[in-house]
Amino acid sequence: MSDSAGFLLDPHAGVLDELLRRAAGEGLYLIARAVDRRAQSVSVVNGRTEEVASSSNLGLGLSVFTAEGTCAFGAVDGLAPSDALVTFRRTADTARVAARMEATPTTAFLSATPNRSRIPQAGRRSFQSVRIPEAETRARGLDEEMRGRFPGLSTRTSLSFEREEWRVVRSDGTQAAWAVTRFVSSQAMTAAGSDGEDGSFTCRATLSSPHFDALEDDSARRVLQLRAEGAARRALALPAAGRFSSAGPVPLLIDYALAKGLAHEAFGHAAEADSFRSSVLARDGRFRRGERVGRDGVSVIDEPLRGDHADQPISANGQPRRRVEIVRSGVLHDALTDLFAADGVGGASNGCERAQSYRHPPIPRMSNIRIELENARPLAAPFEEMGPEEIRRLVGDAGLLDRYPRVVYLSGYTGGQVNPVRGDFLFNCQALYELTGRSVTLHRPSAFRGSILGALASLADGFGPLHLDAIGTCGKWGQSVPSSGGSHAFVLLEPNPNVGVGA
């Protein structure tokens, strides 16, 4: 059976059923997670293939609870019945030892509702249909096209293909299964400084899809081409650009990629229930539900989206994942909670637990997170066709350049740091543009910094429809999972002394 027609883990159902029988016979509660992950990728650098990679992981993770509620976690590679039973025995023994040592118990699992959902992959093609020689040819073609059109750039083009399938069973009768497919085409263009100009500058273009054959679609190929062209032009122009000089608070326009970084790193992590002992969005270990933190119409929302890069419709503990409105029209509304953290922070479980693999215990994590504003203004053209001059006209038509002598536009997101205890963030962008009534001036990348609550309070306007395909990888407690999200094409932050650009 191909993976597009069914579930690859179905033949291993007997192993999981036997583990459930053993747990019931010993008066234990079991959550078992079987995972099958397969990935292939190819990378081309300056027209030459640099790397071809393939990986496959299959295994089992177990959370075993005693009657008192103490827990132990164990994992094993593969799904051989004998190995699974040995792992169960060792994990059960460890849970009993934890009970004798008076480890903190939990009985939150007893409140879970049984779930028997089966959600197949959204992608059209099976993983077995991916042919690396064909992918390599495609990557080399994309890479050579950019080098030919933009001489002087160093280029890196990568194509990756992944299929991940999970099956979660629990002692309460839960039998949940889901599969996700991920395709990513990524291009990085680097321009080096010369004649005394220091440093090099890299700008990136990415396209994600659940479909392994996404680049056979003319519209998807066109989107990637426009994004790559824009990134190439920015990279080539940056060595000659100057540095931005800030003179106090200014209005900031950020694109949806940087808005995703803000939503994910600043707001999302601070709303994860396992951080509430020190999060700026919590007080005395509980989410500050009901407190106003932004303007009317400003919302921060996390929810899994079908076919999205970070899609996970069911939690790693087998619960349906729910839509979470972290901020609803300016007011803190709900937190990212899991089966075990919900009671302690004063809320119900939203099924937000994720795990990198069967080797990792689940913890509260985001899926697709976005900033959304009511009454967003329309765009005159698709996002990929909005160059700096078009963006200057956009903010001018909105009256911003009549109210302010300049608007600073930050383009792209390249990572950053957040301290959820103090509520501070510092992000990096790909380029910075100073927009005035008469001109556009490109500046080298500069830090976007400030306080989480200051940024929430400053969000004022959105431009264009929601764009939710800004992707990345989220690291937390030694686990990395796919992330995604965005906002409207652009969002505006009004001048605020606690939010700015530069050192």
Image (tube, helix red, strand yellow):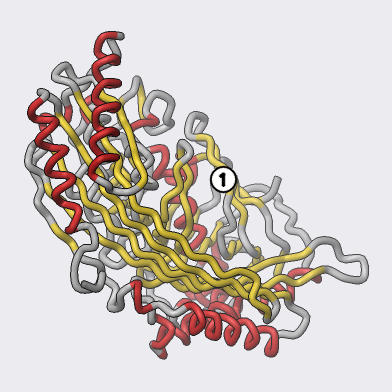
Residue 386 lies, in percent from the top left, at: 52, 79
Q: Name the residue rendered at 21%, 22% in the picture.
A: 106
Looking at the picture, tell me which residue is in the foreground, 145 or 67.
67
Please identify the quarter of the rendering in which residue 270 is found: top left
Residue 142 lies, in percent from the top left, at: 58, 84
- 462 vs 229, left or right, is left
Amino acid residing under circle 1? Val
Q: Which residue is mark 1?
A: 499
Evaluate whether residue 344 shows in this view.
no
How many other residues sit within 10 Å of disc 1, few (<14), some (14-19) or many (≥20)?
A: many
What kind of element bears circle 1?
strand
Whether 77 is drawn above or below 399: the answer is: above
Looking at the picture, tell me which residue is in the foreground, 203 or 181.
181
Quarter of the image that includes the N terminus: bottom left
Residue 21 lies, in percent from the top left, at: 9, 36
Residue 151 lies, in percent from the top left, at: 75, 85
Whether 265 is drawn above or below 2: the answer is: above
Q: Name the residue rendered at 35%, 72% in the picture.
A: 127
Quarter of the image that includes the C terminus: top right
